[in-house]
Image: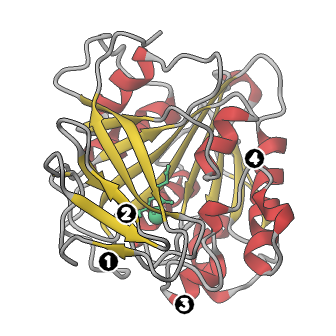
Amino acid sequence: MLALGKLLELTLAGREPAEKTQLTVEGVRMRWLSEGALEVRPPEARDNGLDLLLSAGIHGNETAPIELLDRLLHDIARGDLKPRARILFLFGNPEAIRKGERFVEQDVNRLFNGRHEQSSGSEALRACELERLAASFFSKPDRQRLHYDLHTAIRGSKIEQFALYPWKEGRQHSRRELARLRAAGMEAVLLQNKPSIVFSSYTYDKLDAEAFTLELGKARPFGQNDGVNVSLLETRLKQIIEGTEPETEEGLDGLQLFSVAREIIKHSDAFRLNLPADIQNFSELDVGYVLAEDIANTRWVIEEQGARIIFPNPKVKNGLRAGILIVPSTDENLA
Ligand SMILES: O=C(O)CCC(=O)N[C@@H](CCC(=O)O)C(=O)O
Ligand SMILES: [Zn+2]
């Protein structure tokens, strides 16, 4: 196997490779760009015009997606997987991955779309670098652009695998991309309805990629991911990479759609979230329930029928999202 296939090993060791560019026997070029960043380019005659960005480890303790990208890279470096797409592999927060922590000082996935400019420290610099790497990768005209930012969640979930689809004014969510996600094993998609500061929102909004955050199960340490079944996603990614993806029906085959009713923002240290610590994502909340309380008697009371909570987290920094309240949605506004 080509040494550059061991991007994860290099990243965990904090080392630069001796050789920055290597070629497989089939002429696939692997190029190390920076810590945790590697570009894969098929020979020109085989290139099918797709630019695919695969990122994981934006949160350092979310190891199942990192292991998935590591397997894909090994297969490419051994010549077992023969790309027709250009691919950028990114391990988002190397320092946090080495520590096995979600982040070191601040959450990288709250620093995109310019937020890093209002901040400082190594994670702000990394978010800036990730934006630059993604922008340069997606700078070629007349190519399809696709980004999957892979995550696992802090808690268990009533719906194990789901996607978050960013929003941009005037741009419609794509039915074809949703069908593709369904085929990749996603059971639900949350259709966002406002701008955001996460990585997939940056590539969707600023770089015109089709972009998604994918949640694949519960976060566990390296080597303990048997409970996270990524086989459908892995098969689909290999097909996308090799250009052998079967044409998907436009039907969504039971894919559940949700939209954001409200983001719960923690405003102060007085913030209290009235949920059990072990509550699962997608738990339903009754109308009238006092979900949260904050400074100056602010109360977050459930008003929406069919409301569910995802990503509840009272420990976030003040000013950040402490949960998302979602409601069922339909496919009527899809392009
Ligand atoms: O389990 C949790 O509370 C968080 C899991 C996670 O890291 N989710 C992403 C979602 C990004 C998005 O909103 O698209 C995050 O919170 O950064
Ligand atoms: Zn995450």
Query: Residue placed at 74% from the left, 84% from the top?
Result: 15
* 127 or 72, nearer to the observer: 127
Which residue appears at 22% of the width and 56% of the height?
229
Residue type, numbered disc 3: Lys
Tag 3 and tag 1, C-beta contact below 8 Å: no
In front of the other: 119 or 242? 119
Q: CA distance from mark 2 to mark 1?
A: 8 Å
Mark 4 or 3 closer to N-term?
3
Q: Which disc number belongs to residue 99?
A: 3
The reply to whether callout 2 and callout 4 are in contact (CB within 8 Å) is no
Which residue corresponds to the image point at 34% horizontal and 35% vertical from the top-left?
189
Secondary element at tag 4: helix
| Residue at the front extreme of this rendering | 296
Query: Pointers 2 and 1 in contact (CB under 8 A)?
Result: yes
Q: Is residue 193 left or right of residue 282?
A: right
Local secondary structure at mark 1: loop
Label 2 to label 4: alpha-carbon separation = 21 Å
Ligand 2 neighbours mark 2 (CB distance < 8 Å):
yes
Residue 18 image position (x, y, % from top left) = 82, 77
Q: Which residue is mark 4?
A: 134
Q: Residue 129, image x and y in percent?
A: 81, 61
**Looking at the image, is mark 3 or mark 2 earlier in the sequence?**
3
Q: Which mark is residue 166?
A: none
SS class, disc 3: helix
Looking at the image, is 228 positioned above or below residue 9? above
